[in-house]
Amino acid sequence: MATLSGCLVVRNGKKSVVRCLDALLPLVNEYVIIDTGSKDGTLELIKGWASRHPNSRIVLVNVGSKFHDDDGIFDFGAAKNYAISSATCDYVMWIDVNDEILKPREVRLAFDKITRKMPHACITMLTEVDPSFAFPRVRIAPRTTAKFIGSIHEYMVNEDPQNTIVTTRFRIRNVKTCRDIARNVKSLMKEWRKEHTQRIAFYLGNSARDMNDFFTALDWYIITVDEFPTFTNEERAKAMEAICDIALRENLLDLLDERSMMFINELPDRPEGYYYRAKYQYARKNYPKVVKALEQVMKLNTRVRPTHMWINAEIYDRHQQLEMLKEAQLKAEYSNMSPIAPCIEDASVVMPNGQYVGRMNSAFGDFGIPAYQYTN
């Protein structure tokens, strides 16, 4: 049976380190803990935990500022590669101190089953930041061929030429409540000056968006898509979605027109492009095309499972889609009729036969719906 090392890089993790170690008990054969300069008592907590679990093998290394550069920027990828090099088991699994592994016993059973059949495999799990934000990342790989790429927003790869990626739906919930965005930007810009990559541009866009700097975010997302056209990965898809979302937010309709069609043409089996196409057509008052785009969104939603990163909940909310579709169908049906008096939003609507149908709220958000009264 294959053995598994749990690799943890930590600094000032007093609040969550014991919970993290406890969660790994049913899962790993060895703990590899790299402390990078804790000053809050984290090391003492780890040593105390180790004394209470004498049967658990623990490799604890205090490296201090080893992976900080002269500007104080920390290289997360280098630290995690050091953890891998300190491990002794057949496979390594990386975990952050703020991660909470869900169903660790079941993960171990799956690990044993997968590695018996495919000894060169790496295993992905879903990292969940909130209920609408979960994305797959490689978490487990053979120790001798596992490697981290990047100094910030780093990711694990398996360099074995016989590598097989096994995708699971096991979840690791990240419970970190505060993120140092300024630090991330500083580190990413240092990487960008060394080498232009799609990954760096994408995460610079995310950082700007987190700071509500939407036009800077838009620039980085456009770079992500346009300067790296051969990268057909999830980062590209989410950058295209982010461009559409910001264009909608800022009422940049020409850009929304162009990029929603680009999304549909490149990824016709995903609902995001059609969703933003519906938003664009609604702004242009082309209601039959709104209906057509929304019907495609709903069709694709029955086939696509929302396990990608940064899920826009509206796109996968069937109730929301039905409300939008009903509104668009009503508008399409009566758009060619002559209104006698335009009314404000939430106004009463009277059908051609004089029947009062009540008050209407828009399901389309910022663009609203101009309600009308009609007569024969």
Image: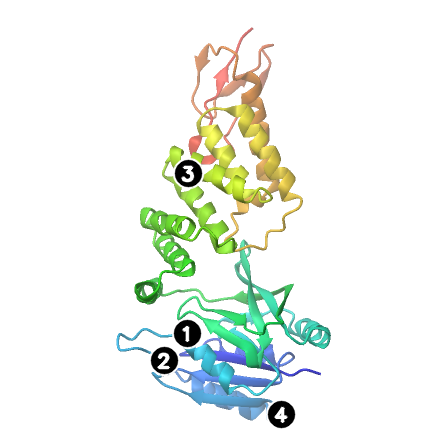
Q: Is residue 164 above or below residue 271?
A: below
- Label 3, residues with CA under 10 Å away: few <14, some 14-19, many ≥20: many
Q: Is residue 249 above or below residue 79?
A: above
* Residue contact at pointers 2 and 1, CB within 8 angstroms: yes
Quarter of the rendering occupied by the C terminus: top right
> Which tag is nearer the camera, tag 3 or tag 4?
3
- Residue linked to disc 2: 67
Look at label 4 and name its amino acid.
Answer: Asn
Q: Is residue 26 above or below residue 47?
A: above
Q: Which mark is residue 248?
A: 3
Q: Which residue is drawn at the image coordinates 58% and 37% (left, top)?
A: 321
- Residue linked to disc 1: 76
Out of 123 and 11, give the one closest to the viewer.
123
Please say whether residue 290 is visible from this viewpoint: yes
Look at label 2 and name its amino acid.
Answer: Phe
Out of 376 and 84, give the one closest to the viewer.
84
Measured in 3D between alpha carbons, the distance from the residue under mark 3 to the one under mark 2, in whole angstroms, is: 41 Å
